[in-house]
Image (cartoon, rainbow, N blue to C red):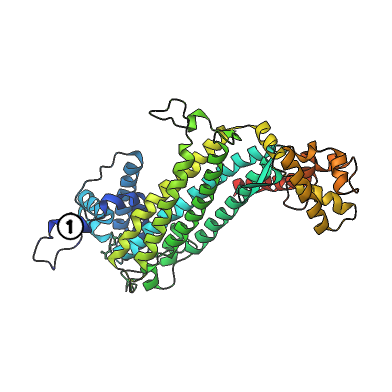
Amino acid sequence: MAQLWGGRFTKETNKLVKEFNDSLPFDKNLIEEDIEGSIAHASMLGKQEIIPLADSEKIVAELKAILEEVREGSFEIKEGYEDVHSLIEATLIDRIGETGKRLHTGRSRNDQVALDMKLYTRKKVKETSDLLLDLQKVLLEIMEENKETIMPGFTHLQKAQPVTLAHHVGAYFEMFVRDRSRLTDLYRRMNLCPLGSGALAGTTYPLDRDYVSELLGFDGPTRNSMDSVSDRDYIVDYLSALSLVMMHLSRFSEEIIIWNSNEYRFIELDDSYSTGSSIMPQKKNPDIAELVRGKTGRVYGSLMSILTTLKGIPLAYNKDMQEDKEPVFDTVITVNRSIELFAGMLSTMKVNKDVMHNSAGKGFTNATDAADYLVNKGVPFRDAHSIIGRLVLICIEKGISMDELELSEYRKISDVFEEDIYEAIALKTCVDKRNTKGAPGSEAIQEEIDFCRNYIAEECAK
Ligand code: ARG
């Protein structure tokens, strides 16, 4: 039995139609979820005496055996079935005969597939969240080791003000805090059980939907059967959250690529996370970062694909919804792998602290601090800005940094300058003094690092 219907048909399905319609080649991914859902459904049918208790027990026992085989890899997924639901039901009937035919009582593939996809997505949401936490652990290590690693902070990709690597990496830690909180939100929102909604209008059997929902670890049953079989919002939520994760990873990739470039040399990626060129022997390329950046497009594509698929579908179930699966499966693998690889790439890279420091020393990243020096001596900020601007110009002409400019030159522009200007514009001073909440100064960054450490401890304990 390769299909679950046929009684009212007088002709065989056209071969191309069957191929086009079948979803087993990809929904076999849902095999565990499908069996888990069926076990809960069959248990409830027995408890409610909708089918004889002995039958329910027999069905559950066989489904558990099949699940075991699937998990240990000995279950053969035979081709030809319409979908994973047909495959499991047919296998059950093959193995236990007539009793197996009672499993689908009070159920439709519409609520069945809605459940399977939810169970799958729920599992994957947790996986993504755990992987992000692992990545954050790597970020925290980098932060702890680089509280004093001064580097230029950029705006417009032009050197702006000195920061530290801990501060820069901490920015990504925060992005992933938000990404993880989005995953928590969507998990909470989606965690209602659609099973028991039937094809669209519920059923006349006395199903105990609360019981099934509890067995499967949901917060409760869904409230409207038509919505339940038609709802794929949570997939949009998930793909959208994953798109943001990729957007963050992609920005980070871009920075890693720049930092790893021959010109910057802020970092060096490990050999084990780089690749070579077939023609240019000297090359060591940051392919992983480039691929993560590239795959971001593919993930956005999946989000657009599901949004577009859903936009014109009338209530309730329509076959269009079968198109929700491949984008999700592809995206989950793409994103989860990207996060995992990113953690490995970052934990093995070498930080060239002196290159970063030297770079921060050039490009007048301390010019704002020089202006602030004048302000502290009573000069209005706008005047200070202009005085320092003129000094910067002099330095550019001389090809030197502000630290190298003689005090006499400073005093030609303003007699407010004294010997202590050099201390005021030293890179270390510029960074250390920035202690507003969230800034790179030593006290402020320590506060942020403490937050990150607590965050990880609390999240690990959940
Ligand atoms: N393969 C289908 C899907 O993924 C399962 C549900 C089929 N339901 C139906 N009424 N044909 O959506």
From the Cβ of disc 1, is ligand 1 less than 8 Å away?
Answer: no
Residue 214: percent from left, percent from top: 46, 60
Q: Viewed as shown, does residue 263 lie left or right of 373?
A: left
Residue 109: percent from left, percent from top: 29, 63
User: Closest to the observer: 13 or 211?
Assistant: 13
Q: Which residue is mark 1?
A: 18
Residue drawn where x is 39% and y is 71% of the image? 227
Residue 422 location, quadrant = top right
Name of the residue lying farthest toward the left: 10
Height in image: 431 above or below 322?
above
Q: Is residue 458 visible?
A: no
Residue 404 location, quadrant = top right
Badge 1 crowding class, 10 Å Cα cut-off, few under 14, some 14 to 19, many 20 or more, is: some
Residue drawn where x is 20% and y is 50% of the image? 94
Residue drawn where x is 58% and y is 38% of the image? 259
User: Closest to the observer: 127 or 400?
Assistant: 400
Total residue callouts: 1
Name the quarter showing ligand 1: bottom left
Height in image: 4 above or below 314?
above
User: Closest to the observer: 107 or 58?
Assistant: 107
Q: Which residue type carries mark 1? A: Lys
